[in-house]
Amino acid sequence: MKVPLLSQIMARPLWCGGGAFFLLGMIAACLTNPTPADYQRRTATEMNTFLLTQVCPEIINRNSAIARVALEVCDQLESRSIEDIERYIAYNTQSYNLGVATLFVTELPMQTIWSLGLFGQIIPLRR
């Protein structure tokens, strides 16, 4: 009768523990994977924040005729609901299901942005 080696006995709990950890990680990734609506909402909020904090002040501080128009547009960005931006993003976004994660790619006129939903960060692609 062959007696199992000590290394074989010790490897089984490690293999089972590693497999259980991997399985729990996959389940957690599936549960936290955002839907397209989550991505659109978050992207619209980030775009609105970017426009209000960086683009609008830069245009308004210039002494030109466009500054008055920009002031009106920026006021509308603050007062109107964000749903218009969400609809625009939804229209220009494609999602790719990668199994555990979803890749969202949004084609904007100035640049393309993408987000691997699992990690949540929106990354601009340089052209």
Image: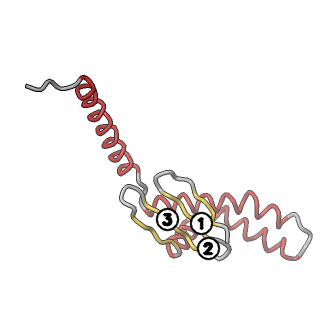
Residue picked out by circle 3: 104
Ranked by sequence position, the earlier of labels 1 and 2 is 2
| Quarter of the C terminus within the rendering | bottom right
Q: Which amino acid lies under the numbered mark 3 shown in the image of this protein?
A: Phe
Residue picked out by circle 2: 108
Left or right of residue 7: residue 88: right
Residue 20 lies in quadrant? top left
- Of all residues shown, which one is farthest toward the front? 1
Q: Write the residue at 84% across / 75% down.
A: 66
Q: How is the image coloured?
A: secondary structure
Residue picked out by circle 1: 113
Residue 86 in picture, x, y percent from top left = 53, 67
Asked if the residues shown at circle 1 and circle 3 are in contact, with their CB atoms under 8 angstroms apart, the answer is no
Ranked by sequence position, the earlier of labels 1 and 3 is 3
Left or right of residue 111: residue 90: left
- Disc 2 secondary structure class: loop
- Disc 1 secondary structure class: strand
- Of all residues shown, which one is farthest toward the right? 63
Residue 5 lies in quadrant? top left
Residue 96 in picture, x, y percent from top left = 43, 67
Q: Nearer the viewer, residue 90 or 100?
A: 100
Q: Which amino acid lies under the numbered mark 2 shown in the image of this protein?
A: Leu
